[in-house]
Image (cartoon, grey):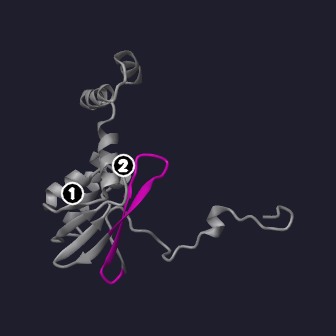
Amino acid sequence: MNPKTDTVHSSAEALRYPWDQHPGPEEVVEVRPGVLWARLKLPFRLNHVNIYLLADGDGYAMVDAGFGNEETIEAWTKLFEGPLKGVNITRLIVTHSHPDHVGLAGWIVERFNCPLVMSQVEYLQSVYHQNRGTEERREAQRLFFRRHGMDESLTEKLL
């Protein structure tokens, strides 16, 4: 890139969206036949997560679950009582271990009695992050370190 001749655009200028508007808090948009788009609020600077539902046999496969908090549960409840009323979730596909994608997975899986589809690495990473800092997690780490030859003093410093 040549700073004297190349034009630098702001990210807002460079981005082109296929839709003028995003779904509102209690809305779902059909972006293609069999593909639904929902947008859920997040409680931090990145203020939303996009969720997709893909036609799947007698229902929809959900791609990602949203952040694990009461606000997201309320948002899903409104969607399932409104535009998604009667929709069966056949499976939950979680793309990765970030809490805004996997956080509400347990709630969705339990509500719809559907399988969770997620790579093993991402699943294990999400379990690790969820349990990080708990006494159970520290005990598992303690046991792991000790079995691999780490002395007690160093083990305790790391924990």
Q: Quadrant of the C terminus?
A: top left
Q: Going by the image, does 114 lie left or right of 2?
A: left
Residue assigned mark 1: 108
Label 2 crowd bin: few (<14), some (14–19), many (20+), radius 10 Å: some
Location of residue 62 (image quadrant): bottom left
Front residue of 51 and 30: 51
> Identity of the amino acid at label 1?
Ile
In magenta, the rendered stretch is 32-52
Residue at point 29%, 44% (across, down):
127
Which element carries disc 2, helix, strand or loop? helix
CA distance separating discs 2 and 1? 14 Å
Horizontally, is 106 left or right of 157 in the view?
A: left
- Relative vertical location of residue 54 with respect to residue 125 in this rendering, above or below: below
Magenta segment includes 35: yes
Which residue is farthest right?
4
Residue at the spot 86% in from the left edge and 63% down from the top edge? 4
